[in-house]
Image (tube, grey):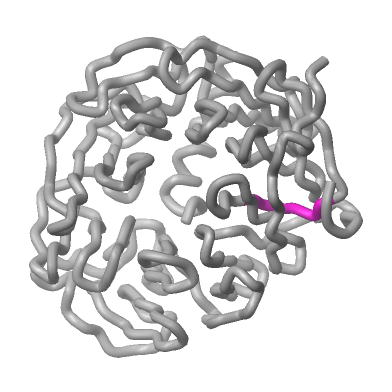
């Protein structure tokens, strides 16, 4: 789920950037105020969260609502193996981001807790059944099952391997960013060294094999938080000012990207898409820059677009949302076009498909082919 610690960090980074420099039905009027968004999705289904009602809902690929939890205030939400099975890391009531209760130890993190959906802890949903488990202030970043997962508390990075939970010290984990490699066999957890994003970052790798997740190498220093991996999983791209390509094995800087700032980045068949967002009195703006996934050569860039966000590779195009509609960018030259497809958020739905979330909280499955990309100028 992107709108937790990740959102806090990216908004802070976006603020720094300002200082340093169709298919489907016709779209309605541009949405205003809080909007529903996709918490996670895959080819099998999707999860939505509506901050207006605090309703978290899981849908299957055909649009059937499998489950819904109301009055939920989550730290993070992720699908478990396939959507819409999910794990929800719940925020303690009447607390800030770090919570007010004592952080659980590795041994306590797997212990069942009683209570309703709104209680501190973790909620596992399989089918239509929900099972509470886990200690207060535990965030699950990735899970294949209730026995195999990667998570954190305010003081530790936790790994559950076949139900055996181990931990390693982790500073400033409230701002931790978790990124999974394209093939799903490795992950990187990056955290700030100090109390602010610009104070430096460190990383902790996790290896994910057939025998479950295991702690990997600790990286003492990286130029910024890891935003995405390149397609072959050998290098990663940092977020923030002067985004940098670093080695996935030890964090050694390999190259700089020809971009001033990266608010987010995503990897796909067309390359690595870097999004930069800037708030302003005239309206928030977004710009996408596409880089080759191996050489990291700059390939194209869009103009700065008002109210545009969520740039990501989708099939042969780059998709984004703007004014409540889905748009597409041509990777060859950055040309963009809007569509009549309703969309306040999007997520990949497998190879060549895209989930487009409507303002009412239901998603439309949009096949993406060459015809969706605007013609090159």
The image shows residue 290, relative to residue 339, as above or below, that is above
Which image quarter: residue 192?
Answer: top left
Estimate the x, y position of residue 231 in percent, counting from the top left. 41, 31
**Which residue: 18% across, 51% down?**
209
**Which residue: 16% across, 28% down?**
220
- In what quadrant of the picture does the C terminus appear? top right
Asked if the stretch drawn in magenta spans residue 16, the answer is no
**Which residue: 35% across, 30% down?**
232
- In the rendered image, the residue lying farthest to the front is 370
Estimate the x, y position of residue 263 in percent, counting from the top left. 53, 31
In the image, 323: left or right of 61? right
Q: In this rendered view, identify the residue nearer to me: 241 or 166.
A: 166
Which image quarter: residue 282?
Answer: top right
Estimate the x, y position of residue 259 in percent, counting from the top left. 53, 14
Q: In this rendered view, identify the residue nearer to me: 6 or 318.
A: 318
For the question of whether residue 11 can be seen, the reply is yes
Please count the marks in the image. 0
Magenta: main secondary structure: strand
The image shows residue 112, relative to residue 18, as above or below, that is below
In the image, 212: left or right of 225? left
In the image, 300: left or right of 371? left
Q: Which range of residues does the magenta coloring cover?
A: 341-346
**Which residue: 59% across, 51% down?**
347
For the question of whether residue 274 can be seen, the reply is no
In the image, 281: left or right of 1? right
Which image quarter: residue 204?
Answer: top left
Estimate the x, y position of residue 119 in percent, counting from the top left. 37, 80
């Amino acid at each position: 789920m992107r709108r937790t610690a990740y959102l806090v960090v990216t908004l802070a980074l976006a603020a720094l950037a300002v200082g340093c420099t169709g298919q489907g039905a016709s779209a309605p009027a541009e949405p205003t105020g809080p909007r529903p968004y996709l918490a996670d999705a895959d080819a099998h289904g999707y999860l939505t969260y509506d901050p207006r009602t605090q309703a978290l809902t899981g849908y299957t690929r055909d649009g059937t609502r499998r489950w819904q939890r109301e009055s939920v205030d989550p730290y993070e939400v992720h699908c478990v193996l396939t959507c819409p099975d999910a794990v929800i890391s719940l925020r303690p009531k009447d607390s800030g981001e770090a919570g007010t209760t004592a952080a659980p130890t590795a041994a306590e993190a797997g212990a069942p807790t009683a209570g309703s959906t709104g209680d501190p802890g973790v909620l596992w949903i399989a089918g239509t059944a929900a099972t509470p488990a886990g200690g207060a202030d535990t965030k699950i970043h990735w899970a294949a099952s209730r026995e195999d997962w990667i998570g954190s508390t305010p003081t530790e990075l936790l790994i559950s391997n076949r139900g055996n939970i181990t931990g390693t010290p982790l500073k400033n984990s409230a701002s931790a960013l978790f990124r999974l490699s394209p093939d799903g066999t490795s992950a990187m957890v990056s955290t700030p060294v100090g109390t602010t994003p610009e104070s430096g970052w460190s990383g902790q790798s996790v290896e994910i094999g057939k025998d479950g997740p295991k702690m990997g190498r600790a990286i003492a220093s990286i130029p910024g938080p890891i935003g995405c991996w390149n397609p072959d999983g050998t290098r990663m791209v940092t977020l923030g000012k002067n985004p940098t390509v670093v080695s996935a094995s030890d964090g050694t800087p390999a190259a700089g990207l020809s971009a001033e700032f990266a608010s987010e980045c995503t990897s796909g068949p067309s390359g690595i898409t870097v999004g930069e967002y800037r708030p302003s009195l005239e309206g928030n703006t977004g710009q996408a820059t596409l880089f080759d996934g191996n050489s990291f050569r700059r390939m194209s860039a869009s103009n700065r677009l008002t109210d545009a966000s969520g740039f990501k590779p989708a099939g042969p195009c780059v998709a984004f949302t703007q004014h409540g509609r889905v748009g597409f960018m041509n990777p060859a030259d950055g040309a963009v076009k809007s569509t009549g497809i309703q969309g306040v958020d999007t997520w990949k739905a497998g190879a060549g498909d895209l989930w487009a979330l409507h303002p009412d909280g239901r998603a439309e499955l949009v096949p993406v082919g060459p015809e969706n990309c605007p013609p090159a100028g």
